[in-house]
Amino acid sequence: MKNIIKFFVRLFFKIIGEKNAKTLVVFIGKLLGADPSIIKASFNQDSKNLLITVYQKIGILNYGNEQVTGEYFVLENILKNIYNDEENIVFFDVGANNGNYSKLLRQFFKKPKIYAFEPFEKIYTSLVGNLSSLNINCINKALGATVSKINIYNDKNDEKSELVTIHKNSLDTLFQLKDIETQEVQMISIDSFCFENKINKIDFLKIDVEGSELEVLKGAKKLIEDNKIGIIQFEFNEFNIFAHVFLKDFYDILSQYNFYRIKNDGLIPILKYDSFNEIFKYQNILAINKNMSVKENILC
């Protein structure tokens, strides 16, 4: 019976819309003697599936490799068209994890300087091993708004360690993790690092730090205000709930940038802030300095 109800829900949902479909399926369910709770559950699940499909159409919840997320598209169709393969080009990979993205950067660009930041010790060891032959600078420090010591947290049983965050309660609430390991690490700012290493500009800054993206940008305040960062890619997701950070905060700190949501076949312009876009689900945002132009053929 449950499968029959699900079949009718999906069929009528597509043909006559949710409201009419619900009325019709409830009527059919009564004729068949179906439990009303089954009908309600079927509608709720189908509504959720429909919402996920819509999200994916606009560049949200597209989990997977770099082709699925659209990050490969950005490298191939945007960065390669804007930046030459020269030694004076500088890329930052913040939250580099095991180095897959830095590897991809090096695949596209042979000469530019690449800095990969990863604070968690065991991940950093893997990062160094994976990038040892690629002439990439690996830094075992966290990036944030200030220079200080902080605690970061991770799933102790996750060998890939892809959920490193400063927001401990997010690991329990979002992923029901109980076995969490803690590590104290050194945090620095992008401004301080660039000053100490005589780096006067960053051409591409990629940030994936599970809810601390805004803090990283706060630590790059001087470079941002001086228009010394060309393109910024950052992740926006459920972790921002625990950081109490909204998309509006990024618009405020990056007022000199145009915003786009990344898809695997182009960019969706979200140039003006709209509360409609405050969706705390996985997505990658590309902020391009307003001094730089974007070709029309890459826009969705």
Image (tube, rainbow, N blue to C red):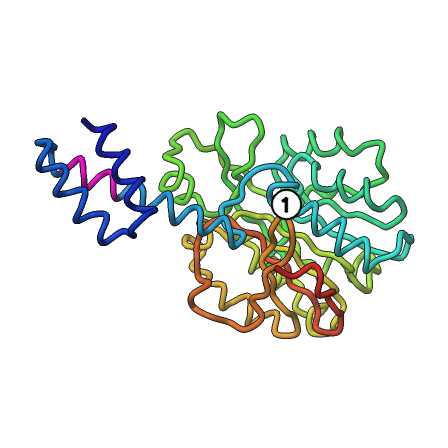
The three-letter amino acid code for the residue at tag 1 is Gly
Q: Quadrant of the C terminus?
A: bottom right
Direction from residue 3 to residue 262 in the image, left or right: right
Residue 80: x and y, percent? Answer: 81, 53
Direction from residue 92 to residue 44 in the image, left or right: left
Residue 46: x and y, percent? Answer: 31, 42
Q: Which of the pair 55/182 is nearer the observer?
A: 55
Q: Which of the pair 232/160 is nearer the observer?
A: 232
Residue 75: x and y, percent? Answer: 74, 49
Confirm whether the magenta stretch covers residue 106.
Answer: no
**How many numbered circles are shown?**
1
Q: Is residue 7 above or below residue 203?
A: above
Q: Is residue 172 above or below residue 228?
A: above
- The residue that appears at 66% across and 49% down in the rendered structure is 94
- The residue that appears at 75% across and 33% down in the rendered structure is 128
Residue on which disc 1 sits: 95
Look at the image and give the residue range highlighted in magenta: 37-43
Give the secondary structure at mark 1.
loop
- The residue that appears at 36% across and 34% down in the rendered structure is 176
Residue 195 image-quadrant placement:
bottom right
Type of secondary structure dominating the magenta stretch: helix
- The residue that appears at 77% across and 47% down in the rendered structure is 115
Residue 63: x and y, percent? Answer: 54, 40
Direction from residue 199 to residue 120 in the image, left or right: left
Q: Residues within 10 Å of mark 1 (few under 14, many from 20)?
A: many
Q: Quadrant of the N terminus?
A: top left
Residue most extreme to the front: 15
